[in-house]
């Protein structure tokens, strides 16, 4: 270890200050999301390319989206005459996640249309204090009795507006 005249100690101190700043920025951004999950990365999430398989990011997004729906829209999914179904998903992979790590998943509704709800999901890596993926899920209301899509029920919209404001 060297002294404080530009040696090794200063470089580590600078790195720690930078890492803390990145962590605080990540936490602040995550706080703007209605649902926040912490998920440990499993060894089995890795693929032959030595990083988490792309499908796992979608599973993490699904876990967050389902938690949002359970807590804020439909409850426990017992009344399935009308329910939410996934119509589309888009994922932008930004940074590879490698075991061991823990990801933080943030979920919020970014848009409500007459017949669909758009969820924005961001996934962060705790190990690197940065975003690793952005997912957009389009969810529609589906009438399971008549086997067709339906308009988004007003009570769903009101529940979403209550938690998103």
Image (cartoon, helix red, strand yellow):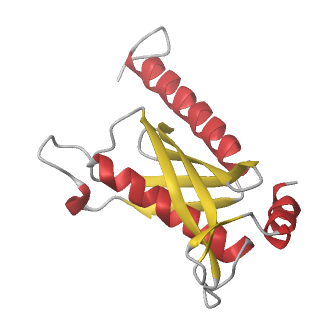
Q: Nearer the viewer, residue 150 or 42?
A: 150
Q: Position of residue 68 (x, y in %)?
A: 65, 67
Q: Nearer the viewer, residue 84 or 127?
A: 84
Q: In this view of the protein, can residue 125 be seen by the observer?
A: no
* Lateral position of residue 28 relative to residue 156, left or right: left
Name the quadrant containing residue 70: bottom right
Could you tell me which quadrant the C terminus lies in?
A: bottom right
Q: How many marks?
A: 0
Q: Nearer the viewer, residue 66 or 81?
A: 81
Toward the left, the furthest residue is 48
Residue drawn at 50 percent across, 31 percent down:
16
Say above or below: 63 vs 53. Answer: below
Residue drawn at 82 percent across, 56 percent down:
164
Say above or below: 72 vs 106. Answer: below
Residue drawn at 60 percent across, 53 percent down:
106
Could you tell me which quadrant the N terminus lies in?
A: top left
Say above or below: 16 vs 83. Answer: above
Q: Position of residue 114 (x, y in %)?
A: 77, 54
* Lateral position of residue 46 relative to residue 33, left or right: left
Q: Nearer the viewer, residue 39 or 143?
A: 143
Q: Position of residue 72 (x, y in %)?
A: 74, 71
Q: Position of residue 37 (x, y in %)?
A: 56, 62
Toward the top, the furthest residue is 5
Toward the front, the furthest residue is 146
* Lateral position of residue 55 relative to residue 21, left or right: left
Q: In this view of the protein, can residue 140 be seen by the observer?
A: yes
Residue drawn at 68 percent across, 55 percent down:
116
């Amino acid at each position: 270890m060297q002294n404080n005249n530009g040696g090794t100690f200063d470089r580590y101190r600078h790195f720690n200050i930078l890492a803390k700043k990145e962590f605080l920025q990540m936490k602040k951004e995550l706080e703007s999301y209605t649902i926040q999950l912490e998920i440990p990365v499993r060894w089995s999430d890795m693929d032959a390319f030595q990083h988490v398989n792309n499908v796992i990011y979608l599973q993490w997004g699904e876990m967050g989206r389902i938690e949002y729906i359970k807590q804020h829209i439909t409850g426990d999914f017992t009344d399935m005459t009308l329910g939410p179904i996934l119509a589309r998903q888009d994922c932008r992979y930004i940074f590879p996640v490698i075991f061991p790590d823990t990801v933080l998943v943030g979920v919020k509704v970014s848009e409500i249309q007459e017949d669909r709800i758009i969820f924005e999901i961001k996934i962060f890596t705790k190990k690197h204090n940065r975003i690793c993926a952005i997912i957009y899920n389009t969810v529609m209301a589906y009438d399971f009795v008549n086997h067709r899509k339906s308009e988004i029920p007003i009570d769903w919209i009101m529940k979403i507006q209550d938690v998103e404001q």
